[in-house]
Image (cartoon, rainbow, N blue to C red):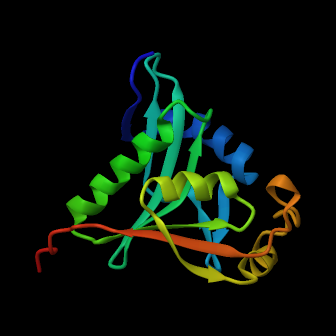
Amino acid sequence: MAPIQVRPAEPRDEADMAVLHHREWGGPYVVVHDTRYDLRELPALVAVDGEGELAGALVYRLADDGLEVVSLVAAAPGLGAGNALLAAAEGIALAAGVDRFWLVTTNDNLAALRFYQRRGLRIVAVDVGAVDRARRLKPAIPYVGEDDIPLHDELRLERRLAATPRPQ
């Protein structure tokens, strides 16, 4: 199996990314920390396999408070796309001189919590009722999530990076 390669998303990736985002989020919109994002309007990285097929996509937001992973979706688990995408996004954060790498997941997403914690991210906050509030902006968010766990809260995970200060 050829290694996963990561590159910035290009217009030719839009259709494949749309399929992943529809499968994972029901479309291009996600609501996180009381903010509605259109994944098509943010920078993205894609992971491609040895055949050149899309293996995953990571959408992010870079700001003074760090690099936020807004969406991370793998076409299939266990192929290394998630690892490769996170490593590439961390490289972007370091190059930008930010020292915080963070994301939000939901209380039901045990697989994601396991995945992120194994990669050094730590739970730093729980926003009780955040998903309940998000339903006002995106009513399609289900009430019951993975493993039949009621879906109510957001968990913020982060890792501090050894970034060099940004030039003034």
Q: Position of residue 1 (x, y in %)?
A: 45, 15
- Residue visible at 11% across and 75% down? 167
Residue visible at 21% across and 59% down? 95
For the residue pair 84 and 63, the one nearer the viewer reads as 84
Height in image: 123 above or below 60?
Answer: below
As drawn, is 17 to the left or to the right of 135? Answer: left
**In the figure, 131 relative to 108: above or below?**
below
**Quadrant in the rendering for residue 109:** bottom right
Res. 41 visible in picture: no
Q: Is residue 12 left or right of residue 37?
A: left
Residue 148 shows up from this direction: yes
Q: Position of residue 139 (x, y in %)?
A: 84, 69
Which residue is the extreme one toward the left? 167
Residue 71 placement, left or right of 119: right
Q: Residue at x 86, y 68 (%)?
A: 150
Q: How many marks?
A: 0
Q: Quadrant of the C terminus?
A: bottom left
Residue 27: where, in percent of width, then height? 72, 52
Horizontal and vertical percent position of residue 70: 53, 62
Can you tell which quarter of the image residue 98 is in?
Answer: bottom left
Residue lying at 73% horizontally and 43% vertically, measured from the top left: 23
